[in-house]
Amino acid sequence: MQRDARQQAFALTEVVQRRAHFSYSDSAEMLSGNSDLNEKLRERLEQAEAERTRAREAVAVVTQRS
């Protein structure tokens, strides 16, 4: 998951650096795609944070029982 995020960030950086070579309509499409990517990454972050919270709570329960 973290590797995928790094790969997407790298790809996005490459696209941004080459954006000057695209037409305006291509740039507009990239911006809307960027928003979609940001939303997906935000959702993944929220899921990961929720999983981390659940894992911490589970560890706390196990620790209390010991």
Image (cartoon, grey):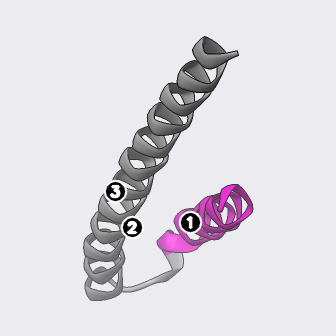
Q: Which residue was labeled with disc 2?
A: 37
Q: Is residue 39 above or below residue 59?
A: below
Q: CA distance from mark 1 to mark 2?
A: 9 Å
**Residue 51's spot in the image, x, y percent?**
48, 45
**Quadrant of the image containing the C terminus:** top right
Mark 2: few/some/many CA within 10 Å (<14, 14-19, 20+): some
- Answer whether labels 1 and 2 touch (C-beta < 8 Å): yes
Q: Which residue was labeled with disc 1?
A: 12
- Answer whether labels 1 and 3 touch (C-beta < 8 Å): no
Disc 3, SS: helix
Mark 3: few/some/many CA within 10 Å (<14, 14-19, 20+): few
Q: Which residues are magenta?
A: 1-20
**Residue 62's spot in the image, x, y percent?**
62, 25
Q: Is residue 30 above or below residue 13?
A: below
Which image quadrant for residue 3? bottom right
| Residue ID at (45%, 83%) | 22
| Residue ID at (46%, 32%) | 53
Which image quadrant for residue 25? bottom left
Q: Looking at the image, which is closer to me, 37 or 55?
A: 55
Determine the main secondary structure of the stretch shown in magenta: helix
Q: Looking at the image, which is closer to me, 3 or 10?
A: 3
Q: Is residue 14 magenta?
A: yes
Mark 1: few/some/many CA within 10 Å (<14, 14-19, 20+): some
| Residue ID at (67%, 67%) | 4
Q: Nearer the viewer, mark 1 or mark 3?
A: 3
Identified by mark 2, the residue type is Leu
**Residue 41's spot in the image, x, y percent?**
42, 57
Q: Which residue was labeled with disc 3?
A: 43
Identified by mark 1, the residue type is Leu
Q: CA distance from mark 2 to mark 3?
A: 10 Å
